[in-house]
Amino acid sequence: MNETATHIKKAPYQKPEAVKELERMADAEARRLHPTMPHPVPRKFRDDTSNDLTKCLVKYINLKGGFASRVNTTGIYDKKLRKYRRGTQKRGLADVIATYRGLSLHIEVKHGRDRLSDAQRKIQDEITRSGGQYYVAHNFTDFKEWFEKLEHNN
């Protein structure tokens, strides 16, 4: 067998307890919001991709009584030019911007080996110098621990 053709099999996803807790919280919210529905569809989350992790972060903060929104900094596709034009957002903004108990939270999602860009490091510095909280989320479990510390210190 050719050595370049060998594949390293990735271990199957093991849902962390923190993600399971998020699912229980989301299910409880669904039952509260729809009390007449006998069997609401279970809410499913995972944190093994950037997109899925971002969904976890936004839902968790909202369930905890905060406000959270995903920030899309992708440009706008121009059909005439057949390419993307830069958006109006400031370069380097975090993926999730939230407010919780009066705190300004900015959360950048980095999955795998991804690192902060220079523009993101500049934004991180601006946020923290102005009194905001900046966090780089690699997984939901670590984020949840960070968030719980914020709750207890605020």
Image (cartoon, rainbow, N blue to C red):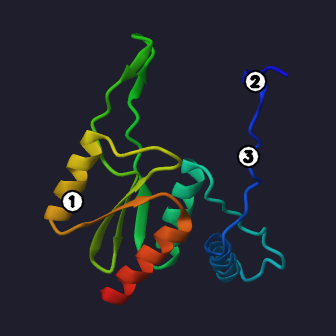
The quadrant the N terminus occupies is: top right
Helix, strand or loop at mark 3: loop
Residue to which mark 2 is pinned: 3
Indicate which disc, 2 or 3, sits on the residue closer to the N terminus.
2
Proximity of marks 2 and 3: CB atoms separated by less than 8 Å: no
Q: Please state which amino acid type lies under the numbered disc 3.
A: Lys
Q: CA distance from mark 3 to mark 1?
A: 37 Å
Is residue 93 positioned above or below 151 on the image?
Answer: above
Is residue 92 positioned above or below 37 on the image?
Answer: above
Q: CA distance from mark 2 to mark 1?
A: 47 Å
Q: CA distance from mark 2 to mark 3?
A: 18 Å
Q: Position of residue 77 (x, y in %)?
A: 43, 23
Q: Position of residue 40 (x, y in %)?
A: 78, 72
Residue to which mark 1 is pinned: 127
Indicate which disc, 2 or 1, sits on the residue closer to the N terminus.
2
Relative horizontal placement of residue 129, taking residue 66 as reference (left or right): left
Q: Position of residue 28 (x, y in %)?
A: 67, 81
Q: Residues within 10 Å of mark 1 (few under 14, many from 20)?
A: some
Residue in the picture at 25% in, 48% down: 121
